[in-house]
Image (spheres, rainbow, N blue to C red):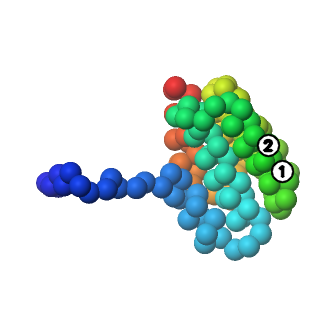
Amino acid sequence: MRSPQPPYSLSVATFPFAALASLAGRSPLGGAREVALGCFVASRLATALLTRTLPTHVRTTRAAAARSWLASLNLPAPARAALGKAVEASGTDNRAAAAAALRKVTEVTATTLDVAARYELVQLTELLESS
């Protein structure tokens, strides 16, 4: 059994989407890495829909900046389109649209992402659909 943390200790930091970040870090330069990075950014932006910690205008601004960043990546056309829709949906208040866009991202990137990275996308999609 684990002992409780002392009252003066810091809470354990968690890193969301560790599998996506890890995949991006170990993939060779080029398409696979950029697909993983695009999925990571889209996931991080969509997470703000769950927590509602950022106002809509801030999420819209972040989505616009991410769209221009995505344009600089070397992505396959289906991944570019799906990631663009996911990023755009993250700037709205429509969780269902964000979930649908992330589901499409998961489908079109299935051959590029590993099992753990796909699982993170599926988990986020399910959270968005259930909330």
Residue at 72% x, 58% y: name it.
35
**Quadrant of the rendered image containing residue 37:** bottom right
The answer, for residue 107, to whether it is visible in the render is no
Front in this rendered view, residue 56 or 67: 56
Residue at 85% x, 54% y: name it.
71
Residue 2 position, x and y percent, is 17, 55
**Are the residues flagged by discs 1 and 2 in contact, CB closer than 8 Å?**
yes
The answer, for residue 123, to whether it is visible in the render is yes
Residue 88 position, x and y percent, is 76, 37
Residue 68 position, x and y percent, is 83, 50
Find numbered disc 2 in the image and state the secondary structure of the residue it sits on: helix
Find numbered disc 1 in the image and state the secondary structure of the residue it sits on: helix
Amino acid type indicated by mark 1 = Ser
Amino acid type indicated by mark 2 = Ala
Residue 85 position, x and y percent, is 77, 38
Residue at 50% x, 51% y: name it.
16
Q: Is residue 127 left or right of residue 94?
A: left
Front in this rendered view, residue 78 or 70: 70
Inter-mark Cα distance, 1 to 2 = 7 Å
Residue that carries the numbered disc 2 in the rendered image = 64
Residue that carries the numbered disc 1 in the rendered image = 68
Front in this rendered view, residue 59 or 96: 59
